[in-house]
Every structure is written in C-alpha cells, then in structure tokens.
Amino acid sequence: MDTLQFQKAEFADPRPLCAGCKTRIDGTYYQYGGREICDSCSAHIRAAQSTAPAAPPLSRPLLFGAAAALACSAAYALITFMLHGAEIGIIAIGVGYLVGRAIRIGANNAGARPLQIMAVVLTYLSITLSYVPLILREVPVAHIASALPTVIGYSLASPLLNLQNPASGILGIIILGVGLLQAWRLTAPRRFLPLTGPFGPTPGPSVV
C-alpha cells in the first residue's frame, strides 16, 4: 500500500457541529429548535430561560411609556406646525418604536401581554392626540375650553374620519398599523425555542 493512497485518504469526522459554539460535539448532545448543540451551550440556554427578567409592576413601564408618548406627540405636532399642516405619517412608525422601547426599559427589559396592550394604546394616543393643538389653533381662544372635548374626540377618531379621502386615508391607516405593530413586537415576552435532549452519544471520527 503506497504512500499515494494514504495521501488521497480523507479524514471524515461524522460528529456534528454545535449550532452555538461551532465546535465538534463529543458524547451526548441536545437539540435547540431542531439544531444540535453541545452540553455547554444547552446549560447556557437553560440558565437564560430560568433567569428571564420578570416584569415589574405596571406603574414604572407606564411612566416611561407615557413620557415617550407625550414627547413624541409634542414633536409630531411641532413638526406638522412648522411644515404648515403637512402630515408626515411615516413618523408613526418611529413613535411605535420609541414608545415600545421606553416601556421595555421601564420593565427592566421584560416583555408581557399587559405591556403590549399598554404600548399599543399609548402609541395610538400619541399619534392621534398630536392633532389636538393643530386643530385648536383654528379655534378662537374664548371657545377653546368648550371645544376641547370635541377636538379630542375628533383626534381619536381621525384615522377613520380620514377615510373620506380613500387614498390618503387607507395609507394613513396602514402606516398607523405598522407603528402599532412595532410597539406590540417590542414589548412581546421573550420566546425560547424548544430544548430537547440529551441524545447520543455522537459517533466518533473514522478514516475513509
């Protein structure tokens, strides 16, 4: 058997690569979301699952979210005022992100269904109520107090009322929906893929 045959021989290692640390798996292995991982990586995943941050009382996330919603609403109204009434609907996407992110920070990076509902409501209020100061500037000062409830109601219903102009109304609702979806996703609870095992042991290397 000549040296040439040895030079052509290939070393085949059937041991799978760990999807986490990218090393060869010796002995037992686990599956995380259908992919093989080593024992060390599975231990890290189990630790992360057991130490997932718990959502604090809703008061702190509400405070953070409300502050972000108020700031976004004021900024949106100011920008629209400076542009002489032109609406920049794409800002709604940014509002959803900022409100959702603020709530997440206030909740110590936790996510939960109540936080998602809070984020969606605050984002909607932030976007729609930004129209209040823009409408009130057309109302005589003496009538502002009496007109305020009507103006607030109109602002809250503005996405539907804008459908009187189908083209811009439908586009506005789509943009609003994207903003609300952004807030919903940012405050969602952390989801872990299924971890199963142990399996094995894995076969050792062989020479072909």
Image (tube, helix red, strand yellow):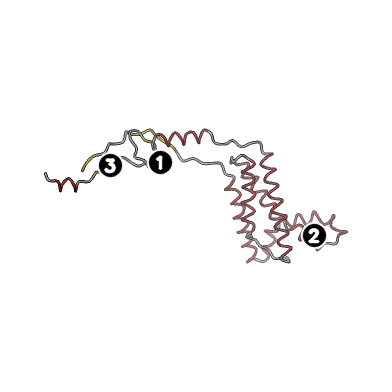
The x, y position of residue 38, in whole percent, is: 38, 37
> Label 3: few (<14), some or many (≥20) within 10 Å?
few
Task: Return the x and y of residue 95 as percentages of the image width and height.
Answer: 64, 53
Where is the C terminus found, in terms of image quarters? top left
> What is the x, y in percent for residue 118?
65, 45
Please tell me which of labels 3 and 1 falls first in the chain.
3
Q: Quadrant of the N terminus?
A: top left
**Label 1's element?**
loop
Q: Decide which of tag 3 and tag 2 comes sooner along the chain.
A: 3
Residue 60 horizontal side relative to residue 200, left or right? right
Residue name at image x 59 percent, y 35 percent: 54
From the viewer's perspective, is residue 165 above or below residue 59?
A: below
Other-residue count near label 2 (Cα within 10 Å), few / some / many at <14 / 14–19 / ≥20: some
Amino acid identity at mark 2: Leu
Q: Which residue is mark 3?
A: 13
What residue did someone put label 2 on?
136
Neighbor class of circle 1 (other Cα within 10 Å; few <14, some 14-19, many 20+) is few
- As helix, strand or loop, the secondary structure at mark 2 comes to helix
Locate residue 73: give its quadrant.
Answer: bottom right
Residue depicted at 70% across the width and 66% down the height: 86
Cβ–Cβ below 8 Å for labels 3 and 1?
no
Residue type of the residue flagged with mark 1: Cys
SS label for mark 3: loop
Residue type at numbered disc 3: Asp
Give the distance between the C-alpha atoms of the residues marked 3 and 2, in whole angstroms.
74 Å
**Residue receiving disc 1:** 21
Seen as rendered, the residue at the extreme right is 142
Q: Nearer the viewer, residue 161 or 155?
A: 155
